[in-house]
Image (cartoon, helix red, strand yellow):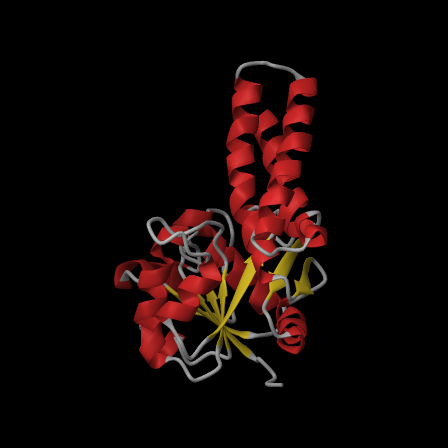
Amino acid sequence: MPAHMSVSVIGAGAWGTALAEVAARAGRKVTLYARNAEHAAQIQATRVNPRLAGVQLHPDIAVTSDIAAAARADIILAVTPAQHLRAAVSHLAPHLAPETPVIACAKGIEHGTHKFMTEVIAEAAPRAVPAILSGPSFADDVARGLPTAVTLATRDEALARALVQALGSATFRPYHTTDVRGVEIGGAAKNVLAIAAGIVVGKNLGASALAALTTRGFSELARLGRACGARTETLAGLSGLGDLLLSCSTAQS
């Protein structure tokens, strides 16, 4: 199994910058890719990303707008919105070495095709190894090194373990699984429940209504997951229920 010493983050938004910090704290050689050359130059010069104000970029993170340079890493974190993942990975694909892990770090299902994120990666970069990272987290907390747990899934268990070892640190704990579909559904479907939770809070329907929505909503999410081949224990774990509870608590604040 490769040592996975280098990591490239494709997407220099708040979450991408936070994950670049994670990889740097884990001792990896990190490249943060920004599509816009001016944006990349600004971050490289100031060591601050305006989209994650107040967080000083780790000194070992290089920032570039050169996609070919970014593609040379042992691990690729694709940190673009779900609906832009296909375009980003297609741009990256010609420069990737065979069997490079490409980890989707967005929650969602592609409009029109109804494809999950790992399916999009498999189509856009057939030589890559698709994976998914999801879990209850906020970019600012992660970037500042506050304790966070997420789930990382790929179908090869040995690879999943290796990726977790490569990205984990004292304050960022990825748990590994081979239940790719469970992680994808847990991350995507909970957003629907989070919106509903916001409606409950906004209409002042009370804590009992919010608890009922959370309980029954998760039950429905689990049935959907099982119908799509997910394992219930994954949906009840960090990528499913944990994300849902975090979304509900955010709606209350």
Where is residue 36? Give x, y as percent: 28, 60
Residue for point 31% across, 58% down: 39
Residue for point 64% across, 44% down: 222
Quadrant assignment for the N terminus: bottom right
Is residue 5 shown above or below 211? below
Quadrant assignment for the C terminus: top right
Where is residue 190? Give x, y as percent: 56, 41
Residue 212: quadrant of the picture: top right
Q: Nearer the viewer, residue 123 or 147?
A: 123
In this view of the protein, can residue 60 be seen by the observer?
A: yes
Residue for point 35% across, 61% down: 86
Where is residue 177? Give x, y as percent: 67, 64
Q: Nearer the viewer, residue 136 or 148?
A: 136
Residue for point 36% across, 52% down: 83
In this view of the protein, can residue 81 be seen by the observer?
A: no
Q: Nearer the viewer, residue 142 or 118?
A: 118
